Image (spheres, rainbow, N blue to C red):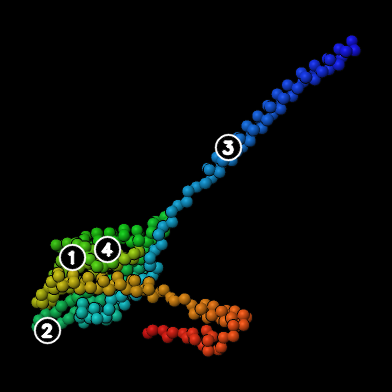
Amino acid sequence: MHRSAPRLSRILACAAVPVMLVAVGCSSDSDSDSDSKKNAGSSSSGTASTKPSEPTVEAARFDDLPDPCSSIAKKTIKDLVPEAKKKNGTAGRSNDLAARSSCSWNGLDDKGVDGSQYRWLDVGFTRFDSDQSLGSGAKRATAEYAKQVTKAKASEGAEKVAAEPAAGIGEEATVVTYGLSKTDEDFAYATVVARTGNVVVTLTYNGAGYAGAKTPSSASIVKGAQKAAKEAVAAVGETADAKVTPPAKSGSDDSTKDAGKKDTAKGSGSSDSDSPKSTTKPKAKSS
């Protein structure tokens, strides 16, 4: 009886060991399953919250427009519109001159018994900014360019309408020619639509002969329109170049002074004649 009691205790102790191992094993498995679910949940939630960024539209090339009445040389105006009523032109109305502007000239050159020649010239600028939802300024200007060409072709009362590319004017250009009868006279018209960057230039030139004078040839009107259009497009670029200012002189002066202080602190022993102040002179601005 005394021997069986210790033996029974050992049997019970051995029997309890597997139960504990099973319990530990279950607990370990459940914990690992819980951790994996948490990790999966956090991973999926992180992926769902990440949104692809929208591509940034190209920045507009030009942020201003030239003075339309100064965009064409005075000599060109004199050649194309002899005896112009207002040699400096008449500016069109605009609520925002940096986005839309225009100017026109007209004049009658009276040649006495040989009749009179009438000429009219108009130039207009339209600029587009880049917009994340609408697209780049260049893309928007391209759409406007196409609209203006279509509009010129559909001019009311136009006859013998023709359109062809105009080389050497901006990035793309089209010249539209047509005839138009008004005030009992025959007019020859040429409209040049050009695009440079995010700016559209629309220039119209026309003429007629009065009191027995002949109507100007379409070729001469086209030649004059293209010449003026080239100058107008060039004016857009010149306006942009004028806004590019050189580095501020104050910054270079400050850096020069700092360099001088460092040399003095190091005891370089440079003389006044070798100092940046005596050798650096501001350049005179070109007129």
User: Are discs 4 and 2 less than 8 Å apart at CB?
Assistant: no
Tell me the residue at 53%/43% (across/down). 47
Residue type marked 2: Gly
In the picture, the disc for residue 172 is 4
Residue 175 at x, y = what percent?
Answer: 21, 65
Decide if residue 152 is on the left or right side of residue 138: left
Distance (Cα) linking label 4 and label 1: 17 Å
What number is the disc on residue 40? 3
Which amino acid lies under the numbered mark 3 shown in the image of this protein? Ala
Q: Residue furthest top?
A: 1
SS for callout 1: strand
| Between discs 3 and 1, the one toward the N terminus | 3
Mark nearest the camera among 1 and 2 is 1
Which quadrant is home to the N terminus?
top right
Badge 2 is on which residue? 112
Would you place residue 270 above or below residue 158 in this image?
Answer: below
Q: Does any portion of residue 247 appear in the rendered image?
A: yes
What amino acid does circle 4 point to? Glu
Mark positioned earlier in the residue sequence (4 or 2)? 2
Q: As displayed, is residue 183 above or below residue 159?
A: below
Farthest residue toward the right? Answer: 2
Mark 4 or 3: in front is: 3
Q: Position of residue 68 (x, y in %)?
A: 32, 74
Given contact means CB atoms under 8 Å apart, are the residues at marks 4 and 3 in contact? Answer: no
Mark 4 vs mark 2: in front: 4
The label on residue 177 is 1
Mark toward the start of the polypeptide (4 vs 3): 3
